[in-house]
Amino acid sequence: MNRQELIERCLEFPGAYEDYPFDETWTVMRHGGNKKSFAFIYEREGHACANLKCEPMRAAMLRDLHEEIRPGYHMNKEHWNTVILDGALGEEDILDLVRRSFELTRPKISKKRQTADF
């Protein structure tokens, strides 16, 4: 999977949009509702990479299991992983990590709104 392919897949999530707050070399995928970032997509050392949020215990386990998953570059190393996109990790595995990151950062539903939905 390359950088552009991942951007296009991220845009399939409801309300997702791409942003370039630093420069054109870093694509930040955000939620429309809360503007929180769920993926940082960039090139580093000749590889397409993505920083994705992850539960701390799962993040550590994934790093132990996969050479392509490392502590988050320029991020909180406990909660973010860097995933090398053009490595041996399969597309379905990458997309599952993106989906989890999207879920972890999605806007919270307020208690008032939850009550109104019933």
Image (cartoon, grey):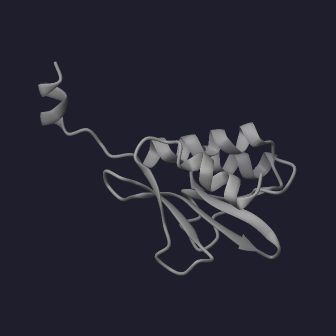
Which one is in front, 63 or 52? 52
* Vertical position of residue 44 compared to residue 1: above or below: below
Which one is in front, 25 or 67? 25
Could you tell me which quadrant the C terminus lies in? top left
* Vertical position of residue 5 compared to residue 48: above or below: above
The residue positioned 59% from the left and 74% from the top of the image is: 74
The residue positioned 68% from the left and 59% from the top of the image is: 4
Residue 89: give x, y in percent of width and height: 81, 47
Residue 56: give x, y in percent of width and height: 56, 50
Numbered-mark total: 0
Which one is in front, 62 or 102? 102
Query: Quarter-wise, where is residue 113 in the image?
Result: top left
The residue positioned 49% from the left and 42% from the top of the image is: 13
Residue 96: give x, y in percent of width and height: 64, 38
* Vertical position of residue 111 compared to residue 66: above or below: above
Relative placement, left or right, of 53 versus 109 is right
* Vertical position of residue 16 compared to residue 3: above or below: above
Residue reaching furthest to the bottom: 23
Residue reaching furthest to the right: 88
Residue reaching furthest to the top: 118
Residue 104: give x, y in percent of width and height: 46, 45
Relative placement, left or right, of 2 versus 37 is right
